[in-house]
Each structure stands twice: as C-alpha cells, then as structure tokens.
C-alpha cells in the first residue's frame, strides 16, 4: 500500500513535476549519446485503443489546438491503436498530439513513435530527410510533410520504445508500454547522424529507460489523482497488459480535497 499525505490536486502537481524532471533527464541522457547538449525537449506517449475517447482539452487551450491539428492530420487513416502524448518537458507544447500506430499498404510503419511501438526499436527522423511514407493515402502524405515543415520547429526527432517484461506471459519476451520522443535542434547535425544506426539507438534506449519508467509511473499517478478528486480522465491506457495499464499498487490513497496535509 502506498499512502500519499497530500490532496489529489497536490498529488497531481507533484507527479507532473516528477514527470517533467524525468523527461528532462532523459533528454540530456540521449544527448550524451548522440552529440552533446543542445536545444532539446522530450515527451512521453502511451498506447490506447482507437475506439476510446481522447481526454477532453480545455476549449481554446494549446493542447486543444494541438489535438485538432492531429485529428486533421490523420483523418481517413484507420488502425486499432494510437499513441497519445501525455507528458513533456516544460514548455514543449506537444501535449494533446497523437499518432495512429498504423502501417501503409506496403507494410511500412508510420515513422517515429508508431515505428518504435510496432517494431520495438528506436528510429530517428530528420526534417530535411523525411521518409516518403510509401503505401499511405496521398492526402496523409501531403499533410504529414506539411506538418513537419510548418509546425515541427526542431531539426529532428528520435523515438525510443520503453520495453518491459510481458507480465501476461512471463518469460515470453517484452512489450512496449510507452514511447519516449526526443525533439532536438543541434548546431551540428552530423554528430546526430549516428541516430540513424540501430547500435546507437539501442545505447540511447538503455540510457533513457529508467527516466522513461519514472515518467510513465508519474503519468499513472496523475490519472489516479484525478480519479480521487472526482475528475476522471477519459484516457484508457491499453498496453496489452492489465498490470502495466495501472499503478503497481492497488491501494493508493490520497487525502480528499480540503483534508489535512
């Protein structure tokens, strides 16, 4: 049993700060692999069923605008799962964005987070060297390239899967419960070209793993804090494992709002 001697709102804020700190540490850890410190941000994406509603964003908020941009970007592209950004470093401005875990008709995954999620391996995408998105509808290809050139302000991003043991069938392998994205604008891109190579991506994946796990649990704590405060979030994490879809402790307690802290 875990007891948090704080109100749900305070617990939410604490978990949010923990998530931001962990993602910031993950960003710097990845920079140490690919080319040293630079302007970088990080965010965490979790999987969910496509037929479940996404969290409601405040009207007019930046998250709502980001969400609507994603809705328009992926209109007409269907699959059974999507990945949603639920946490990020301070000021990144990507919360609310989502991507379908989809493949084109040729079997190629969407680049970035979908690739990392479906292939269980990292991938780098440079803005000046975008993949062609073969096998996808022309409208989606056009909108994605437009999004990357007009709305993605960094020079590249790297997506790394968070792998954990498959708790449903111990000993059978791993599953992906989240994807960590790094958005970077290095002064010299050449050093970051190593992100094209799986050997370096695996090293980076190992270095950010513990920070990604902390951010993931912090997100689950935010969900629990909202539930305890009577503000349940309409997000349904679906990793494929009920154990990883929720906090590892089932008797989490927070004081009710207005209680003694």
Image: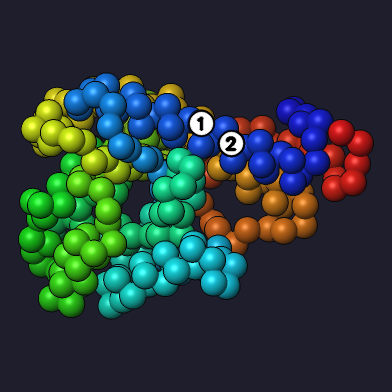
When the figure is inspected, residue 95 is found, relative to residue 72, above or below; the finding is above
Q: Position of residue 197 (x, y in %)?
A: 10, 32
Q: Residue at x 91, y 36 (%)?
A: 260
Q: Position of residue 227 (x, y in %)?
A: 71, 52
Q: Residue at x 80, y 41 (%)?
A: 7
Taking depth in this image into account, of 44 and 186 the one nearest to the observer is 186
Taking depth in this image into account, of 251 and 180 the one nearest to the observer is 180
Neighbours of disc 2 within 10 Å: few (<14), some (14-19), many (20+): some
Q: Position of residue 243 (x, y in %)?
A: 54, 38
Q: Position of residue 228 (x, y in %)?
A: 76, 49
> Which quarter shows the N terminus?
top right
> Which quarter shows the C terminus?
top right
When the figure is inspected, residue 142 is found, relative to residue 108, above or below; the finding is below
Q: CA distance from mark 2 to mark 1?
A: 6 Å
**Which disc is residue 242 wearing?**
none
The answer, for residue 101, to whether it is visible in the render is yes
When the figure is inspected, residue 28 is found, relative to residue 40, above or below; the finding is above
Residue labelled with disc 2: 17
Residue labelled with disc 1: 21
Q: Residue at x 46, y 59 (%)?
A: 96
Neighbours of disc 1 within 10 Å: few (<14), some (14-19), many (20+): some
Q: Residue at x 91, y 41 (%)?
A: 259
The residue tagged with tag 2: helix, strand or loop? Answer: helix
Q: Are marks 2 and 1 in contact (CB under 8 Å)?
A: yes
The residue tagged with tag 1: helix, strand or loop? Answer: helix
Occupied quadrant, residue 255:
top right
């Amino acid at each position: 049993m875990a007891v948090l001697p704080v109100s749900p709102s305070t617990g939410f804020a604490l978990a949010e700060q923990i998530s931001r700190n962990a993602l910031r540490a993950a960003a710097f850890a990845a920079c140490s692999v690919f080319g040293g410190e630079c302007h970088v941000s990080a965010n965490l994406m979790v999987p969910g069923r496509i037929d479940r509603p996404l969290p409601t964003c405040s009207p007019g908020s930046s998250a709502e605008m980001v969400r609507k941009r994603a809705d328009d970007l992926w209109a007409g592209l269907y699959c059974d799962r999507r990945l949603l950004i639920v946490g990020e470093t301070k000021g990144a401005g990507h919360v609310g964005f989502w991507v379908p875990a989809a493949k084109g008709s040729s079997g190629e995954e969407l680049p970035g987070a979908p690739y990392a999620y479906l292939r269980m391996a990292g991938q780098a995408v440079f803005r000046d060297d975008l993949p062609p998105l073969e096998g996808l509808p022309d409208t989606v290809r056009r909108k994605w390239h437009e999004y990357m050139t007009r709305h993605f302000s960094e020079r590249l991003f790297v997506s790394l899967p968070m792998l954990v043991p498959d708790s449903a069938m111990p000993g059978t392998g791993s599953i992906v419960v989240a994807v960590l994205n790094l958005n970077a604008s290095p002064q010299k891109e050449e050093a970051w070209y190593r992100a094209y190579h799986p050997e370096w991506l695996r090293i980076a994946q190992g270095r950010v793993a513990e920070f990604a796990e902390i951010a993931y649990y912090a997100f689950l704590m935010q969900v629990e804090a909202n539930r305890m405060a009577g503000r349940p979030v309409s997000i349904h994490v679906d990793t494929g494992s009920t154990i990883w879809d929720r906090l590892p402790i089932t008797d989490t307690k927070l004081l009710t709002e207005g209680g003694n802290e």
